[in-house]
Image (cartoon, rainbow, N blue to C red):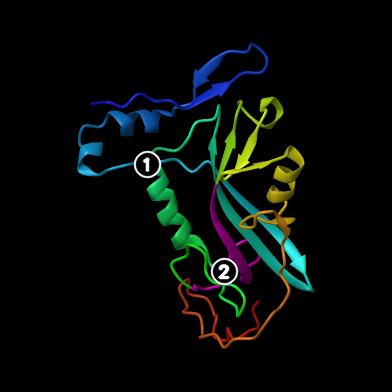
Amino acid sequence: MTIKYRQQLHCPNCNSVFTDETAFGRWLRTNKSLPSSEGYTFYDIDFIVHKYKTYDNRLFQLMMNIEIKTHGRKPTKEQRATLLLLNQLVKNRRRTPTKTLNMQAGETIQRAYDAYSSRLINIRHFGYFLLTFSGAGPEDSQEILWNKNSITEDQLTGLLRFDYDPETWPLKNLDLRRHHKIPVNRTLDMFGLNLADDSREVS
């Protein structure tokens, strides 16, 4: 049975509403060899937020994924379960004496090869977040929710700028200070590059 496609777009000029399904998405949804009854589910990724940020003379790249819901819609039970699994896998925050790992698979690598700068860089991935608009977007919504918390349009801008730590509530300023030193193993040469010495300080 083909599931009805629900995701819609709103045209601010003519005020019409139409679906945004791609040809590939329609093919997946109607492919009888990939039925949901056998456990196959397919979701598109709404937004990846990626920012270079310098703190204390150190270059960081900050990332998070955002799932967008409009008109107050909520993710299905299956989608919520998938997003929670992905959140635990991609987050790479470190445990500190005063902070535990919140819904995270474990401590993972915090430096990765950046093809743009051709070097190893510090990377922080904060995980997946649910952004819900009561309308079609920030400008026509009476309420904006970050996960389940009500925020203003200005706070949303601050979150997308990584001015705030997206996991905190009430929202707190993002803290990238160097808190402690830990030994780190050498990085494997996955890309055929000379990454022999990978000991460093991390926060």
What residue is shown at x 61% (from left), y 40% (from top)?
145
What residue is shown at x 57% (from left), y 61% (from top)?
125
Give the Cα distance between marks 2 and 1.
Answer: 26 Å
Quadrant of the image containing the N terminus? top left
Nearer the observer, 62 or 142: 142
Specify start and end residues of the magenta stretch as a single range: 107-129
Type of amino acid under label 2:
Arg
Point out residue 180 in the picture as x, y percentages from the top left corner.
Answer: 66, 83
Q: Which residue is mark 1?
A: 77
Q: Quadrant of residue 174?
A: bottom right
Point out residue 58 in the picture as x, y percentages from the top left corner.
Answer: 74, 73
Q: Is residue 34 visible?
A: no
Q: Label 1 neighbourhood size at 10 Å, few (<14), some (14-19), many (20+)? A: few
> How many numbered discs?
2
Residue 37 lies left or right of residue 194; in this view the side is: left
Q: Secondary structure at mark 2?
A: loop
Type of amino acid under label 1:
Lys
Does 115 lie within the magenta span? yes
Establish if 68 lies above or below 97.
above
What residue is shown at x 69% (from left), y 54% (from top)?
170
Q: Which residue is mark 2?
A: 93
Establish if 152 lies above or below 26.
below
Residue 74 lies left or right of residue 169; in this view the side is: left
Point out residue 106 in the picture as x, y percentages from the top left corner.
Answer: 46, 71
Q: Which mark is residue 156?
A: none
